[in-house]
Amino acid sequence: MCQLYSGRVTTSTLQNDLDLVLVAPNGVHLFPYRLNPQQPLEEALTDAPNRVDNVEVIDSKASNGEWVVRVTASRLKNNAHQKFSLVVTGLKLQ
C-alpha cells in the first residue's frame, strides 16, 4: 500500500545539511534529485543542491576520466562535525 503526502514541504527541518555534487571529467557539475515544493508530484529536478533530504542520489552516464565527489556543509548545528557515508555503484577501475 502506498500513501502520498498531500502537504507541501517548503523548508528544511534538517539540523545538519550536507550537500553532494559530482563533477564530471568535462567539468559539468551534477546535482542530486530534489522535488519542486510547488509541484511535488512532477519529475524531480537536478539543477541545484538538495536542501531538504538527508539522503541524496545522483545518477550519471559513465565516461572515462577523473570524477570528483564533493560533500560540503551548507548548515551545521553549532558548528558541529557531521559524519556521513558515501555509496558508489557501477564504478569500474582501470
Image (cartoon, rainbow, N blue to C red):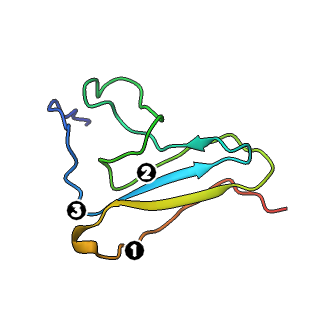
* Residue 66 placement, left or right of 33: right
Residue 68's image quarter?
bottom right
Q: CA distance from mark 3 to mark 2?
A: 16 Å
Mark 2 is on which residue type? Glu
Q: Which residue is mark 3?
A: 15
Please report whichever mark, 3 or 2, sits nearer to the chain's N-terminal start: 3
Mark 1 is on which residue type? Lys
Quadrant of the image for the C terminus?
Answer: bottom right
Vertical placement of residue 58 versus 69, above or below: above
Query: x, y (%) of residue 38?
Result: 25, 25
Residue at image x 39%, y 74%? 83
Q: CA distance from mark 2 to mark 1?
A: 15 Å
Q: CA distance from mark 1 to mark 3?
A: 13 Å
Q: Which mark is residue 56?
A: 2
Q: Which residue is mark 1?
A: 83
Query: x, y (%) of residue 25?
Result: 73, 48
Residue at image x 68%, y 45%? 27
